[in-house]
Structure formats: structure tokens, C-alpha cells
Amino acid sequence: ASLSGMVNVEALAALVNSNQTGTSLNKDDVDSSGTSFLNGGALVFDDFIRNLIPSDSTSETANITIDDLTNFSENQVARQETILPSSLVKSDRNVDAERILQDATRRLETMLNETSSALSPINIQSIFEQAGNVLDVERASKSTADLVSFGNKVLYEGLESLFLPKYASIKQINSDEQQLKIAKPSEFAVLAGAVYEDPVENSQSVNHSFVARGKAADVAWMVTDSVQDESDFLLDVKSRPVLVRTVAIRGYDASDEDVDRVRLLNMICTANSTTLGPLRVHEGMFSIARELLADIRPYIDWTSPNHKLVFTGHSIGGALSILLMAMLTVERGVKFVEERVLRVYSFGSPPIFEHPEDIASTCTNCAILSSLGLENDIVYAYNQPWDPIVRLFTKIDPLYPLIDDIGDDGVTPWVNGPTRTLRPIVKAVLESWEDCANTAVPEIDSMVEISSMEILPALDEIFTLDVFLISYVAVAIRSFIHHFYPAYVGPFVEFAKEVQPRQVER
């Protein structure tokens, strides 16, 4: 399928009629695939029209309606008998549009069922817009309504249907929660990306005042202040202004020559578990978090009792944000965190906790947060589906050969591995971050909610990555693009802008 993903409705209607009457189209009118209705993938209708209509005709484009073909065919009977399916032209010069649409609907449904994983909602919407422009809606209103209804179902339930019915927690984010779970989080996604670039300018772009920045354990952090509406974080509270201090933590940045990158990589790869209160946590990350907390503690202690706290970060920065919240819970108690911490946002972060064996998990209950005495909604974690880092250190980790075989230069992974690996790509990524940051990232077409206990099984089943697959260059590039912080900033912000007008309309 081409990138446009558009259906050639005229060609589809012609093919419907030819199949019903047993009339075959010329072999030259169909490309090598012979099955797809997508432009560039099946019926080359442009050539068909050019062969049908003389060069001196006023209609020389492929955007010809069925009535145009009907009217023209009266003067081209001989040519039409050999090229155009006879059932397309009726003696009364009217086309049975309703029957064509019914058949088209059935065929579109079959096609969409088979290709739902490849077509985005935007492309599907274009299909129905083109169908409405080409076919006579007045003569086929009932079938057109059925077609549009089916299209809406695909648009609004398509991604969710990939996971159902196996994963009970999967659901669409309804309109009442879009400010809470999409619009407001996109603001903190900007801050998670700002700490990689210009913290002052990017913080001000989302109405945050820059307070401080620093580095601890080779990880950069920054602190901002802002005035927020508390109802943007909590559904059951009245709208009121509240002072919010945000701590944003950066992920691994190979372009930063002021930090010891080898030391940081070694800490990230030190995945032995250690104790934090009732939990077992990633030892290397816990060591980094202790140094971070020592640095930012004054910016927590110097706030007023009415100040609220938000932690945010991308990649290991998001994991460290969650870990800092857990450390404050153990150090200062559940009441302090419940009263002072509004939310923790993580974007593309690796897991860092072991599952507690003595606490049962369900699709609505996170055993890790429950063991700390905290509610599930204190942490919002956002994952791109092809991001391999969110699977790190788990049973579905596709990168495990990379993390224990780093070369002496600190940027060459899997030194002793086979040649067909990610080695050259990852090395280039680590050596030249700026080039990678400018790589185009995918737009967000849809967002669904799923529990922390079902996210990994769902990713493994629907968006499968393994060591063999990710060793292909195309899959590797897609995976790393989906993890770079730009994939969690720009597309997220644009998607939030799209849902906000819909929320106002509703």
C-alpha cells in the first residue's frame, strides 16, 4: 500500500460489477499484486481511463464519476465492450449505486479486517471522504450511512479491538478524562524533553518558570514552578489554582561530554535487585536515585506546605522519577506523598521494580503501588508501542545481549556478538545524538489505556520484538525512533491539540 492509503472507489465499483457478471478486466489494467484496492497496490485506474477516453476529450483525469463513464459510454459502445465491464452501464443511463455501495461495503469490511494493523484512522477517514465525493449519496443514502457507521466504528474502536477481549483493562480514554490523561500530560512531556535541550526556553513555552538545574550521578535534572488548576490532575476536586513544583529528569544522553557516560551505562546495566522498603528495586538505578534525591531535596524542603510536587522524565529519567516518589514514600510516609505529590509522569521508561509475591495484582490493581500504600493513579506511564526500552530487563526484553557487552570506547555494544546485530546502528546513535534527534518521528493517531499488569503481555503479543527481529536494520531504526524523546514530545503535543477541540464540542 502507498503512504496515502487511499482507496480508488471508481476502480472498486468497476471491479465489483466485473466480479458479479463474470466479466474480466484486461490483464494490463491490474498490477502485479492483483488483490489490493489501494492506490499503487492494485488496479491502475488512471491507465484504464486514459485508454478509454480519447486524448482530445475534456475529461482526462482519473477523478471521473460513474455517471461520467455512463454518459461517455453511449458514444463508445465498441470500445466499451472490450474494455469497460458491460454491467457498469445501464440502458436508462442510471447506475445502481445502492447495490454497488452494498458490495463495496462488504468488500471494504473484508479488506479492513485484513489490513487493520496497517491502516491508520487518518487514512481510513480519507477512504470514506473520497467515497462520499465520488458516489451519488442521494441514490444510495442507506448504504452510505451504513458505510460511514462502519468507518466510525473502525476509527474509534480499531486500536482497542486489537487487544480485546483478552486484556480486560484496555479501554479508550473518554472525553471526560482527555484533559486529565492527554492534554495535561503533554505539558509535562515537553518538560521531559526540555531537560535534553534548552531548559529555560522550553519551560517557558508551557508557562513554567525555570528555577534550577544540575547533574547528579551523571544524570541531568531541572526544577520549574507553575500555577496549575488542581482539577486538571484530580477528577473529583473543584477547580482551584495551586502552586506546582516540577522535577524533570533526563534520560541517557550520549551527546553530553560533561558526564561519565561509561559509568552511567554501567549503572543502568547493574540490574541486580536491592531493597527499598517493601520492594525489590534495580540496584544501579537506586544508586543513581539516592544521589539525585540528595541534590533536589532542598527544592522539595524549601516549598510551602501548599506547594504540590510533580515528577516527570523520559527513559531512565521517567524510571528515576517513579523511584524518587517511592523513596519519599518510604522516607516521609504515605500521607506526605498523598498530600504533596500530584502525579508522576514517565515516558518510555524501563521497569525497575520486582513484582511483590505477597500482594495479588489484578487488571485494576498495581501490586507495586499497593505495597507502598499508594493509589494506582499517582503514576501515569506513556509508551510508544515499538519502544524496546519499556521492555528492558523483562522476559520480553529484545536488547538483553547489548547490555553486558559494551566495548572499551563506551559506545560499541555487543562487541563479541555476531555481525548481524544492532552494533553499527547503536554506535552511530550514541556517537551522534543530534542526527538522531532530527529523525522524523511517527504521529499519534490513537491512545488507549491499559493496566501496568497487562501492558507487557499485550506489547509482546500485538507489537512483537525479539532479538532476531530487532537485528534487521529497518526494525532497529523503527525501534530507536520510537524511543527517542522527540517521539514522546512533538506527536504527543499535536495529539493533545486535536482532542481538546473535540472535548469542547462535546
Image: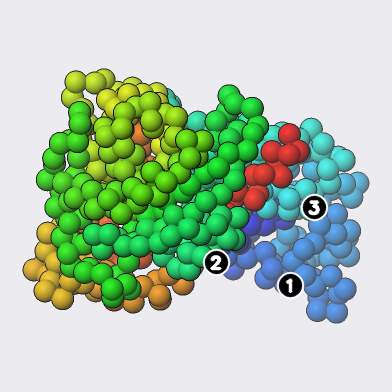
Could you say which quadrant of the image residue 324 lies in? Answer: top left
Look at the image and tell me in which quarter the C terminus lies: top right
* Closer to viewer: mark 2 or mark 1: 2
In what element is the residue under mark 2?
helix
Q: Earlier in the sequence, mark 3 or mark 1?
A: 1
Q: Which amino acid does label 3 sit on?
A: Asn
Q: Residues within 10 Å of mark 2 (few under 14, many from 20)?
A: some
| Residue name at image x 42 percent, y 29 percent | 338
- Which mark is on residue 133? 3
| Rendered view: 273 above or below 211 | above
Spatial distance from mark 3 to mark 1, Cα to Cα?
Answer: 21 Å
- Which mark is on residue 201? 2
Spatial distance from mark 2 to mark 3, Cα to Cα?
Answer: 46 Å
Q: What residue type is labelled 2?
A: Glu
Residue beneath disc 1: 50
Q: Which of marks 2 and 3 is nearer the N terminus?
A: 3
In what element is the residue under mark 1?
helix
Horizontal and vertical percent for residue 178? 60, 38
| Residue name at image x 85 percent, y 79 percent | 56
